[in-house]
């Protein structure tokens, strides 16, 4: 029954949008494991005028979004992202490589703060900005301390737990996220409004303190992104499809993701 309903909703969405729709729905970090199944879905579709990526993700690796955008654009002239609920961090990076983002009243983008695997805890991912915030906090504590021994103890304790090579790698991830954002905006979403590229990049990569800050459709518009508001039947279909995928994945292993098309 769910499969029949899924295909019916996808077919209706494709008719309304005049596109081919690919669904990526995941509760686990986005990484390169998506690339081979994504290519297989795209190869099945073949070259087409317009592709919509129905995207629900809370983020992931810094390099993967750029690869996803480049791969999808090999198969279409126009590329749009539909966000039913959350497309955060690395998923927001994918949005920057689209021609438009379709958002409803509950849809959220987020700051581009890539996730990296924790060096000690298996399958535990952390926002890269957290490390920089840690150093800023330590610096503040040291500057506010009148006791040099306390400052030295704090710094020694922290540094003893950190690998300098790891710190450098994290810093590279931050710089890479900015580079990718500028590249995608200049090639695609803001190619006709280049004056906004630096401003939007700065805002998304360094303008928010919370990794989970919700950037709704109005704020995304005000920022300068090309937002199409989903209303009426379009939004009804998007939201029903989101709820269906949520139900389907809730009964599966939490490490799974769904990548699917109408076929």
Image (spheres, grey):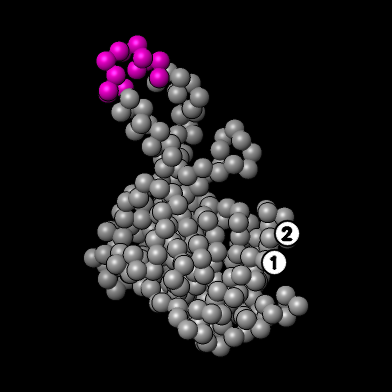
Residue beneath disc 2: 252
Residue at image coords 57%, 56%: 30
**Residue 73 appearing in the image:** no
Work out which quarter of the rendered image holds the N terminus and state it: bottom right
- Quadrant of residue 214 within the rendered picture: bottom left
Above or below for 154 versus 185: above
Q: Position of residue 36 (x, y in %)?
A: 64, 63
Which residue is farthest right? Answer: 1
Query: Which disc is residue 23 wearing?
Result: none
Looking at the image, which residue is at 59% across and 75% down?
240
| Residue 54 is one of the magenta-drawn residues | no
- Spot the residue most to the left: 195
Asked if the stretch drawn in magenta spans residue 144, the answer is yes
Residue at position x 40%, y 15% from top? 153
Above-or-below relation of 241 to 93: below
- Which quadrant of the view contains residue 167? top left
Q: Nearer the viewer, residue 248 or 89?
A: 248
Image-based side of 38 in relation to 100, left or right: right
- Crowding at dot 1, Cα within 10 Å, few <14 / some 14-19 / many 20+, comes out as few
Q: In the image, is 155 to the left or to the right of 55?
A: left
**Residue 140 appears anywhere in the view:** yes
Name the residue at 72% across, 75% down.
2
Considering the numbered disc 1 on the image, is that residue within a helix, a strand or a loop?
helix
Q: Which quadrant would residue 245 be assigned to in this image?
A: bottom right
Give coordinates of residue 207: x percent, y percent: 32, 51
111 relative position to 71: left or right:
left
Q: Which SS type dominates the magenta stretch?
A: helix
Q: Position of residue 247 (x, y in %)?
A: 67, 66
- Closer-to-camera residue (237/168): 237
- Residue at mark 1: 248
Mark 2 touching mark 1, by CB under 8 A?
Answer: yes
Q: Which residues are magenta?
A: 142-154
């Amino acid at each position: 029954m769910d499969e029949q309903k899924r295909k019916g909703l996808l077919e209706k969405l494709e008719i309304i949008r005049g596109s081919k729709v690919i669904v990526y729905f995941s509760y686990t970090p986005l990484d390169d494991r998506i690339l081979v199944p994504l290519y297989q879905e795209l190869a099945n579709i073949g070259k087409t005028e317009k592709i919509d990526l129905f995207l629900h993700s809370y983020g992931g690796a810094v390099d993967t979004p750029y690869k996803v955008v480049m791969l999808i654009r090999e198969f279409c002239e126009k590329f749009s992202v539909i966000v039913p609920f959350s497309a955060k961090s690395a998923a927001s990076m994918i949005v920057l490589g689209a021609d438009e983002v379709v958002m409803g009243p509950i849809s959220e983008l987020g700051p581009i703060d890539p996730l990296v695997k924790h060096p000690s805890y298996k399958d535990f991912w952390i926002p890269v900005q957290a490390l920089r915030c840690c150093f800023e906090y330590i610096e503040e504590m040291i500057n506010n301390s009148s006791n040099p021994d306390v400052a030295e103890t704090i710094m020694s304790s922290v540094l003893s737990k950190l690998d300098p090579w790891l710190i450098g790698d994290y810093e590279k991830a931050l710089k890479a996220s900015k580079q990718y954002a500028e590249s995608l905006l200049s090639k695609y979403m803001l190619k006709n409004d280049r004056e906004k590229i630096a401003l939007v990049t700065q805002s998304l990569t360094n303008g928010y303190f919370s990794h989970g800050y919700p950037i709704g459709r109005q704020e995304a518009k005000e920022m300068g992104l090309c937002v199409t508001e989903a209303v009426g039947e379009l939004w009804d279909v998007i939201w029903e499809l989101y709820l269906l995928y949520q139900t389907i994945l809730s009964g599966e292993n939490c490490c799974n993701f769904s990548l699917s098309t109408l076929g």
